[in-house]
Image (spheres, helix red, strand yellow):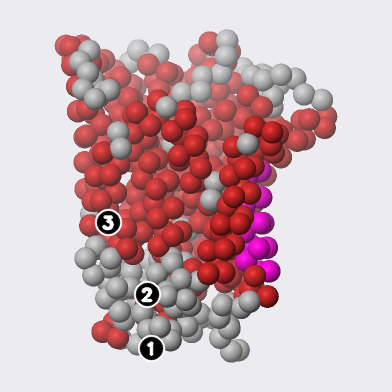
Amino acid sequence: MSAPGSAPPTPTATPAAYSPRLYNADLAPRGRSAPWRTWDLFCWWMSAWHSLGSYTFAIGLLVLGLTGWQVVVAVFGGLLVLLWGCNLMGVAGQRVGVPFPVFARLSFGVFGANVPALLRAVVAVAWYGIQTYLASLAVVTLALKLFPSAAGLAGTDLLGMSGLGWICFLALWAVQLAVLTRGMEAVRKLSDVAGPVLWIAIAALALWVLGRAGWSVDWNHREGPALDGPHTVAAIVSGAFLTVAFLSGPMLNFADFSRNSPDARSIRRGNALGLLVNGTAFALVSVVIALASAEVHGAAVTDPVELVQDIDSVTLLLVATVAIAGSAVGINIILNFVSPAYDFANLAPSRISFRTGGVITAVVSLVVMPWQLYSSPVAVNYFIGGVGALIGPLFGIMIVDYHLVRRGRVDVDALYSADPAGRYHYRRGTNPNAVAALAGSGVITLLVAFLPALGPVSAYSWLVGCLGGGALYLLIEKVRPAGAPLPD
């Protein structure tokens, strides 16, 4: 049993007593080894935050009418909310000691947990493919610089991508798959190296762009319309919650990583240093790069690949390309690969391992042709964005269930039991209260996200979903409890 402030729980049942429909070695409760300490989580956040997508997102806030320094304030505000949420989910995951889809069984039932797991997997798989595609564009640029004769391959077309694009995309696709199939320890070691190295590359890019701009930037530069005081505050708050939405996926499944930490203190310190301090610093450097590029090009460059194309030195171009490709590999494995690998394994544990789930993730991300998804705003906004909008309600339901309804007390063995009399079997393996709360709050969240009339508040869709899902679930549990908490 797990309780607030207690040591990680020790299951009393043996693996042989667990249902094969709910258990395999990868989904098992954590053993004695807990290698993810403060430094590892700090590096994890560096790998998770340093990417083309994070840069583009931060600079995109300029379009709201914010100045450079106001963008940094907005991102900092969002990171404070994310720090709060990641500490809640991270400490819960560490105390229970199980991966996200197993942790979700507490709220949704031993079989109903496949609902949040698959919703998270869909978003992750799609963005895994898109991130790989974006990184391959940088590799294509390098290939054309080093081998001008490859221009012929770049002019061909196969299913919407050039022959050279296919070669670069598949090379990155294979490298990422090779890392994941070596297990979570390989993921930890990769993030320990990739995070610090990428910081060096990003700092070098900032210095190079600043040099071209004459070491001068205009912190009051804005890409959108000038705003008065109240509208500026509103835009900063909107930017903060857009930041939360941007990283809401990894916050939801943070238990996949925090469960491997030795104690809650390591998680809180790792999050504070890696998410808050490092995240704010990265936003600051991103804004400096954007403002310096505005001095050179007349407008902030939102795509670092465009800056890389201006590099004349082949050596510097090689370093920059490796950094960009490396950042994509790091963020993909950390944010978009580990989660669906566990989520697919949760569907049929006796047949799908973590490694097999990773292979499924890689294959599906290729079959959906991410370059076509990325080129279609409708697909990104309505399919990926629609599913992603449900992350807020899922987070609210699970946090309320663990911290308020169950009061942090968990029967770990029951999470692997298919017995109809089991504590988390609820009704046919699904908790109807959680499903009802998700359906009710999910409809409201989707309306906020996509209904044109509610456009001014669409940036708050995660907040609406989180508060709505959590409040509705708590209300239903008060009226019709699905399961009593464990005794003190």
Q: Point out which mark residue 357 bears.
A: 3
Amino acid type at circle 2 is: Pro
Q: CA distance from mark 1 to mark 2?
A: 11 Å
Query: From what the image shows, is residue 284 above or below residue 318?
Result: below
Does residue 340 belong to the magenta stretch? no
Q: Point out which mark residue 429 bears.
A: none
Question: In this view of the protein, which residue sits in the foreground, 224 or 443?
Answer: 443
- Crowding at label 2, few (<14), some or many (≥20) Cα neighbours within 10 Å? many
Report the residue at 57% width, 33% height from top. 58
Tag 2 residue: 29
Report the residue at 27% width, 23% height from top. 160
Q: CA distance from mark 3 to mark 1?
A: 28 Å
Amino acid type at circle 3 is: Gly
Q: Point out which mark residue 12 bears.
A: 1
Q: Which residues lie in the magenta part?
A: 459-475
Q: Tell me where residue 417 sits by quadrant.
A: bottom left
Q: Are marks 3 and 1 in contact (CB under 8 Å)?
A: no
